[in-house]
Image (spheres, rainbow, N blue to C red):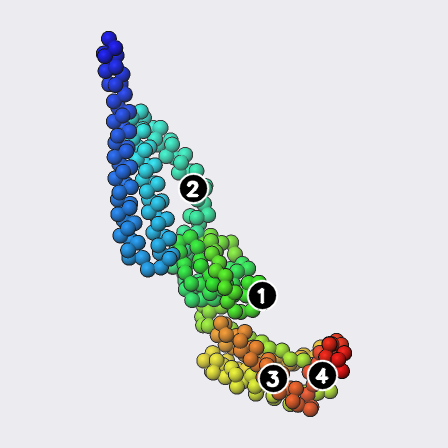
């Protein structure tokens, strides 16, 4: 009787054992195939981002297929496909809610491909993040930041990952969508008793010598604006140049103009004077 009972028990458990065996076989097969595919793709990958994307993608595929196989075997065993449909519907709704932002990000990625609001190499600003785009993935935009902790157009050394979904929530500024030229400005302030005409001539001459090639390429002209301030007359020189070198050009103009103004006896720079260490020593 014990043998007969044991055989009956084993016979009753055969369907579930069969289902478990089938699930294990399929899971091993999926694991084997994904490893082969991953290995083949990694051999062709050339960058760190490609390697990362391949590993993440194969992992997602492996997990997704494993869940599908387990669910399929389970509901085949209990013989209720209605339950499978209900669970699949609930799972889809839950995933849709949980993955709302990533899905929106993929939609933004498609928008980037189709509309081309910017591309790799462009200097852009998304919200408070400004920098040069060096990669675009289905989920993130990779930016080599400029400025950052300092007020400058120079690379900060930080790399920022901006989620794609933010493109639908933030203003996007592209500094080089039509061309790479943007306006730059350098200001100087001279005293009211200075020779204004001579100062304008000197500033225009130095500035033009430095930026003339960029003005020619941009098909723009050098402009000088004058305004009266409480401490003196402000002279602003404006020019067009590639966004990535505007800051260095402005600095070069400032240095050369300052040196020339210091030599002139008819022009004096206006500034708020504070007693310094050198004066104390005198």
Mark 1 vs mark 3, CA separation in Å: 24 Å
Q: Earlier in the sequence, mark 1 or mark 3?
A: 1
**Residue at the spot 65% in from the left edge and 89% down from the top edge:** 263
| Marking on residue 257 | 3
**Residue at the spot 56% in from the left edge and 69% down from the top edge:** 152
The image shows residue 65 at horizontal and vertical percentages of 31, 40
The label nearer to you, 1 versus 4, is 1
Q: Are marks 1 and 3 in contact (CB under 8 Å)?
A: no
Q: Along the horizontal axis of the image, is 62 left or right of 276?
A: left
The label nearer to you, 3 versus 4, is 3
Q: Are marks 3 and 2 in contact (CB under 8 Å)?
A: no
The label nearer to you, 4 versus 2, is 4
Mark 3 vs mark 4, CA separation in Å: 15 Å
Viewer-side residue, 107 vs 38: 38
**Residue at the spot 38% in from the left edge and 59% down from the top edge:** 113
The image shows residue 192 at horizontal and vertical percentages of 73, 84
Mark 3 vs mark 2, CA separation in Å: 61 Å
Above/below status of 40 relative to 189: above
Q: Along the horizontal axis of the image, is 47 left or right of 123?
A: left
What residue did someone put label 2 on?
Answer: 96
The label nearer to you, 1 versus 2, is 1
What residue did someone put label 4 on?
Answer: 191
- Identify the residue at the far front of this view: 281
**Residue at the spot 32% in from the left edge and 38% down from the top edge:** 66
Secondary structure beneath label 1: loop
What residue did someone put label 1 on?
Answer: 150
Say few, some or many: other residues with alpha carbon within 10 Å of mark 4 (under 14 / 14 to 19 / 20 or more): some
Q: Earlier in the sequence, mark 1 or mark 2?
A: 2
Secondary structure beneath label 4: loop
Say few, some or many: other residues with alpha carbon within 10 Å of mark 2 (under 14 / 14 to 19 / 20 or more): few
- Say which quarter of the image contains residue 224: bottom right
Q: Earlier in the sequence, mark 3 or mark 4?
A: 4
């Amino acid at each position: 009787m014990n043998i007969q009972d044991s055989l009956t028990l084993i016979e009753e458990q055969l369907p579930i054992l069969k289902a478990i065996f089938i699930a294990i076989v399929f899971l091993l097969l999926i694991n084997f195939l994904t490893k082969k595919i991953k290995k083949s793709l990694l051999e062709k990958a050339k960058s760190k981002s490609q390697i990362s994307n391949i590993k993440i993608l194969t992992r997602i595929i492996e997990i997704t297929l494993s869940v599908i196989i387990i669910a399929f075997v389970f509901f085949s065993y209990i013989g209720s496909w209605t339950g499978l449909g209900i669970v699949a519907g609930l799972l889809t709704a839950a995933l849709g809610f949980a993955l709302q932002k990533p899905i929106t990000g993929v939609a933004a990625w498609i928008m980037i491909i189709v509309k081309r609001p910017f591309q790799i190499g462009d200097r852009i600003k998304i919200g408070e993040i400004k920098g040069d785009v060096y990669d675009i993935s289905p989920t993130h935009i990779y930016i080599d930041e400029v400025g950052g902790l300092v007020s400058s157009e120079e690379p900060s050394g930080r790399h920022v990952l901006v989620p794609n979904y933010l493109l639908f929530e933030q203003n996007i500024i592209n500094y080089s969508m039509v061309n790479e030229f943007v306006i730059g400005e350098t200001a100087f302030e001279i005293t009211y008793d200075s020779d204004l005409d001579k100062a304008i001539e000197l500033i225009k001459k130095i500035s033009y010598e430095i930026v003339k090639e960029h003005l020619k390429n941009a098909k723009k002209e050098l402009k000088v604006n004058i305004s009266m301030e409480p401490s003196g007359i402000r002279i602003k020189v404006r020019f067009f140049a590639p966004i990535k070198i505007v800051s260095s050009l402005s600095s070069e103009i400032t240095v050369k103009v300052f040196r020339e103004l210091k030599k002139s006896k008819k022009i004096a720079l206006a500034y708020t004077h504070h007693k310094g260490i050198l004066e104390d020593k005198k």
